[in-house]
Image (cartoon, coloured by chain):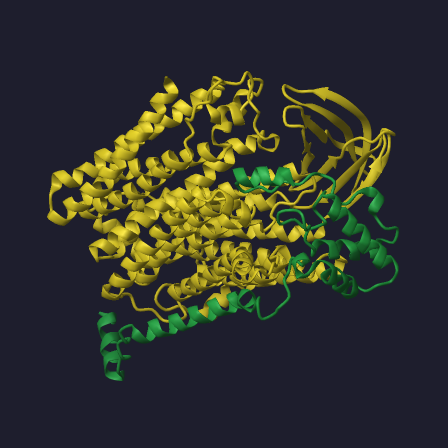
Chain colours: A green, B yellow
Amino acid sequence: MARLRALLAFGFLLVAAAAGAVQPDEVMKDPALEARARDLSAELRCLVCQNQSIDDSDAPLARDIRLMIRARIGEGESNDAVRAFLVSRYGAFILLKPPFELSTALLWLSGPLTLALGALGVYFARRRAPAAPPPLTAEEEKRLAEVARD
Amino acid sequence: MIVEAGHFALILAFALSLAQASAPLIGARRGDRALMAVGTSAALGQFVLVALAFAALAWAHLASDFSVLNVAENSHSAAPAIYKFSGVWGNHEGSMLLWTLILAVFGAVVAGFGRALPARLRADALAVQGLISAAFLAFILLTSNPFERLSPAPFEGRDLNPILQDPGLAIHPPLLYLGYVGFSIVFSFAAAALIEGRIDAAWARFVRPFALIAWCFLTLGIAVGSYWAYYTLGWGGFWFWDPVENASLMPWLAGTAFIHSAAVMEKRDALKVWTIFLAILVFSFSLLGTFLVRSGVLTSVHAFASDPRRGVFILVILAAFIAGPLALFAWRAPMLRQGGLFAPISREGALVLNNLLLTTVCAIVFFGTLYPLALEQATGEKITVGAPFFNLTAGVLMMAIAFATPFGFSLAWKRGDLLGVAQRLTVAFAGGLVVLVGLVAFVRGGPVLAPIAAALAVFVMLGTLSEVASRAWRRGASLGVTLSRLVGLPLSFWGGGLAHFGAGLALLGLASTGFGAETIATMKAGATQTVGPYEITLDSLAGRTGPNYRETVGEMTIRKDGVVVATVEPARRLFATRQMATTQAGIVTLRFGQVYTAIGDPGDDGAVAARLYWKPLVTLIWLGAVVMALGGALSLADRRLRFGAPAPARSAAAAAARGAG
């Protein structure tokens, strides 16, 4: 993907892809099956591109995988089965959402861990902070009310 | 000659930045006013010199001086003037020069307008700013010299990458850099405060305008980049969770958190240590973004290893400017006195929650972006972290933030009344619920989260409006009184309200993407296809020639129920110099939605692959961002909080009494 590399070398907030990911001749006749194929495609990485799903990529390999998915869905395979087949063939690298494993545990838990650490930090900061003054006694409340009335 | 003068000016600027980095710092320690004043003149001088260097490079580009390597590689004599000019920063060397120019601009602003600041704080801040300048000027001079000559000079340049030949290039990078680099001032002030060992509410007042300016520009820069990608790509995607995008999102998230925590510090003298930490964090993310984009580490780890000079240089800068202040922070932070008590249910408490959630989203984006690199380096295992991961993790948290936003905006400082706020938000809540039920009941299909996001967006907008109303309206008050109260509300409150409303708008636009329609078909001239509520006819296909490209244009007519509503001209452009094709989408905005059309290369039979989309409310995504930035600007315009403005005791006290947001 020379275009993409050129962009990244220049590198701002832009990813380039050509218009022409899914081609008209790829589309399946049954809209329900086609919708499944599209959903599945959006979860799979174009292996030769920089961070693009095969649904967005115009690379020939992406097209091959799109056609492969459609053929398998057409034969009645479930999404999970197609996904499992692709992972066995290309590795977990093809999944845009990595599976939860030991090696990706830190990634998946980064959110909950940060939240927990932050909550702990807030808790201890509050404990360390000077204690709030004790609430007013009934007598003080009465005096306050008198002062406020004046 | 002009080019050499530019190069020389840059070397002089480097020398000046070294003076700026050292003299004021020593002066502040010794109490030497003359030495401290060196910082001011050095910052101004440095700005002039870097501006001269930039002007020299711009001249070389505009004059198509192909004896300059940078021009020969990135420009073309036939290119339109605007792309000759924006081509200055459409490459590595030039964009780094723009980065340093903006750094110098901000330094000059502090030097020129910061007379009301405490002298030592200003001297220290300018010194830190000088240190950053020195690091990046050294980086340019040693590894990325844009003034390098080429002998013999070629007759023609290699042209700018066609994808970059777009008005987007003229606007997007400068805006983004103003945002990135604007936070350097906040960073410098944080470092200065740590050097001084004293931080108070006044500090938050000093940095507030800079943080707001930077945040506004960053918001706009990201929005422009997103819209640029949207109309360039040919299928209407606008956010891809690409590392390059994430690199700009992280400072935005941390910067948003900073603006909120600085508000607490300014009003209530609380959260000081955390705010300083955030100030360091925001600019660290800006630097990290620069490293990720500029080192080439993202494209491939191997490319980075084969020419590591630039990458390692930026990595050293990154490490020094993160580790240094963090060490300073670890040393000084325990000495900082905490102040400002508040109950958990209060405006402060809500802002702590805001910071907690925003920081968590930032952490997720950080891990998601860098984890694959780290894992491959450590174990050789290759994984991909893409949109489905981020949408699930960061998306859900962003929705939690959206839900909490109206509550935080309505709670009182110090001790809030959650029940009372919930009552005031009843209308907003009901509005959101109606949207949710309506969408679930009447719209089939689409992602599960879309109706929830839409409902939350409506909740945020109505919640913000109802808070504005409740500030102005009292039972039994006449319309005139209510209106005058509305006008009397402080600008910073209006700014906050507008920004929150904008966030709601953007969220509504994002949610609406779940309800669009798409048609992919092969079309010949005369053919008609339906997408959403529209029928689109391809009237003709024609060839055209531009200044440095040839294109195939499809004339399309859009009809609704047989009535013509618009015509569009999607095109496919071929740039001869680089043998590259780009897609020019044909887009028309109908109310807040858009019909988006794109065509591929025509086949031998005269048919093209056409992509037709109906994207309801899609423009709200970017309009929302513009409204957010406007909110920031409005808040900036608040007279009481202007940069360096002396604080009149009476009006400040009156504002505090009004409970200004």
Quadrant for residue B584, please give it.
Answer: top right
Camera-side residue of B114 and A15: A15
Is B531 situated left or right of B386 in this image? Answer: right
Quadrant for residue B416, please give it.
Answer: bottom left
Vertical placement of residue B134 versus B274, above or below: above
Quadrant for residue A144, please give it.
Answer: bottom left
**Image coords of residue B122 (percent x, y):** 23, 45
Is B448 situated left or right of A115 in this image? Answer: right
Q: How many numbered marks, from 0 up?
A: 0
**Image coords of residue B565 (percent x, y):** 75, 33
Q: Residue at x 33, y 49 (%)?
A: B187
Vertical placement of residue A17 versus B504, above or below: above
Camera-side residue of B50 and B71: B71
Q: Quadrant of the C terminus of chain A?
A: bottom left
**Image coords of residue B309 (percent x, y):** 43, 42
Camera-side residue of B296 and B601: B296
Q: Residue at x 82, y 28 (%)?
A: B539
Vertical placement of residue B403 versus B22, above or below: below
**Image coords of residue B566 (percent x, y):** 73, 31
Camera-side residue of B86 and B430: B86
